[in-house]
Image (spheres, coloured by chain):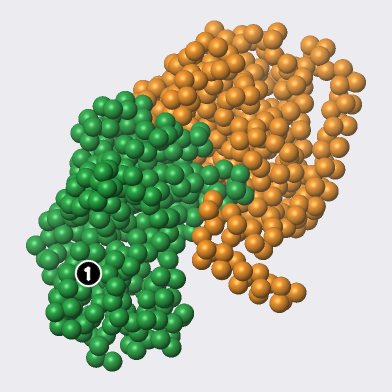
Chain colours: A orange, B green
Amino acid sequence: MSSNTEPITLLNAEGIYSANKALPLDVDAVDATALYRDMVMARRVDTEAIALQRQGELGLWPSLLGQEAAQVGAAHALKPRDVVFPTYREHGVAWCRGVNPVDLLGLFRGTTLGGWDPAANNFNLYTLVIGAQTLHGIGYAMGIVRDGDVGTGDPARDRAVLVFLGDGALSEGETNEAFVWAAAQNLPVVFFCQNNQWAISAPYSVQSKVSVAQRAQGFGFAGVRVDGNDAFACLAATEEALAAARAGKGPTLIEALTYRRNPHTTSDDDGRYRSGAENDAWAALDPIDRLRTYLTSNGQLEEAILEQISGQEKSLAEQLRSGCRALPNPGPASPFQNTYAELPWELEQQMNEHLEFVEAGE
Amino acid sequence: MSATSTRMPLAHALNLGLRHAMEADDKVMLLGEDIGQLGGVFRVTDGLQKSFGDHRVVDSPLGEAGIAGSAIGLAMAGYRPVCEIQFDGFVFPAMNQIITQLAKFHHRSEGTISVPVVIRIPVGGGIGAIEHHSESPEAYFAHTAGLKVVSPSTPQEAYDMMGLAIRSDDPVIFLEPKRSYWLKGDVDSGNSPEELQKATVVRDGQDLTLVAYGALMPVALKAAEVCQSEGRNIEVIDLRSLSPIDDKTLIESVERTGRMVVAHEASRTAGLGAEVAARVQDAAFHSLLSPVIRVTGYDTPYPPSRLEEDWLPGLDRILDGIDRSFTY
């Protein structure tokens, strides 16, 4: 596997596929239309959410624009029993995992600190503290090992953990602790780093002198560097790494080299730290355009499919708009009720005091 | 003393509590630095790896955030991890995981997931240790919603509270008074322990309520004995649960005695004593004959151990605090 080399591309910027021995992919078995559809839908979630933020319906939104191939490619490598630990930008992964896209908005609207049941789709809650989720993934992977759900050879049983992180998280001590644990305990975990090159305003050069993938070597496991705007390469690398993890062969760090084309969040002004020319160069490498060119030139994207996707997009947009506004405000008792599994009597007293106060004000 | 009762030091009682919890539930597992072959630097986990194997008693890499963070993931995967942090002053690298993650998961998930993690920390001074080995970080944890914070003072309490903490669906910070590890007492493993959030009146009295916890309990009881010989009848309460605080028991007591002294090793400012004093004056202002007096460590870093005997609230300082209460 490559580490500090050029990232592996299977589907180039012109939409032409070429096999690469370093990263095998059974391209005939890939449902490229499904990949395309999910990337389009992920982008639509993002576009609608940004619009909702502009309309004052959301307090904040971290955009994924440009990272659709990395997220959807990686997500398509998952099996239902695999477990995902995301950051706060994995809207495309959430979409592929079957999380209701309206539920993604609650955290950013301020109706919830979570938004979905992490166990329902094996997709954990977003993590705002950079790198913290890497260690949760480690613990979960330890649980998988102790459950005997790794290396059995039974595809219905073996499972793995897919941890998402950004390039900034590589600088956090906790991420490095996670790498130490994963290696030392040979855990069934894949770290998928979307190197979008910017940790808010700090470029990757502030974080590291070597590539993300190369850093894995120091911890004692494989690092692979792929073109993060190439859904095929992201899918192939994640499939291979997850298969190794499920088989008991330990962790992998995948670096998907991509670019965050929007500001860090809707509150950020990226004009203060980077050039429009850089952004234009990456826009020319758009992951969705690339896959569409491939599909079109292979005759796989007929007009009927495009129309169908377009219809699904429209109904998704409508679902997000009306769903966002309909998200229920949390009840005044909810913080008290959910702080502990067993409500302490004193907190119950504080809750009652508060409810009385709230009711008196109504 | 029942048939199941045996005399043992507090550290052994903790070990027995862990052993019985692991026997009762195969999802209970231990992780921490040096807890396996070595049995922990205080031997609290002695022999457990031999009995339960290295998949249930895990010698972790040296990383406190990793211990706390991986415990969260294990809890999400259905396990009940009990972590050991080697010393109080070394819990701080794990604070991010404990405060921003562990304490909040139940809340963030709107109750859909629980993270039943116990974090054991040997705490406090009085053993002649060097820097970072004698601290009392309880107020940091007690200030964080979502955590339970407890500290036992006797071997029986240690055994009972360990079982209760592990069975709790909430994260529990379990503070072990390290200078009491060798304190001996009877442990009845067939005991039906009280709930975790319960203070205990360990000595009845009418003249003043003395509140303490952990390593200061034997000192508080000694102070009450000394006062008895001087004709003052002191009621002594073991707080046990530092968060949530069982203020019902405190208030009931002070309504009878009219006076309260609260003692702890931790620094005074924003410490547990301040919380106890505030609650008591809020609920029982008219019963108080004097202000609630705090006898605490000072607002300095924990001193070099050659000074700790003077620095720590000992018998004389507690007696002085009691005397001050009676000057009103």
Q: How many marks?
A: 1
Residue toward you, A37 or B252: B252
Is residue A308 visible in this depiction of the protein? yes
Q: Disc 1 marks which residue?
A: B220
Identify the residue at horizontal 31%, vertical 44% (top origin).
B189
**Amino acid type, residue under disc 1 in the picture:** Ala
Question: The C terminus of chain B appears in which quarter of the rendering?
Answer: bottom left
Residue toward you, A294 or A116: A116
Q: Residue furthest bottom?
A: B328
Residue toward you, A309 or B190: B190
Query: Helix, strand or loop at disc 1?
Result: helix
Residue toward you, A195 or B293: B293
Identify the residue at horizontal 65%, vertical 35% (top origin).
A120
Identify the residue at horizontal 46%, vertical 44% (top origin).
B116
Chain assignment, label 1: B
Compared to residue B101, the image places residue A149 above or below, namely above
Identify the residue at horizontal 67%, vertical 63% (top origin).
A332
Q: In the rendering, at what x and y percent does residue A193 appear?
A: 52, 31
Q: In the rendering, at what x and y percent does residue B297 appear?
A: 24, 69
Compared to residue A303, the image places residue A257 above or below, namely below
Classify mark 1: residues with Cα within 10 Å, few (<14), some (14-19) or many (20+).
many
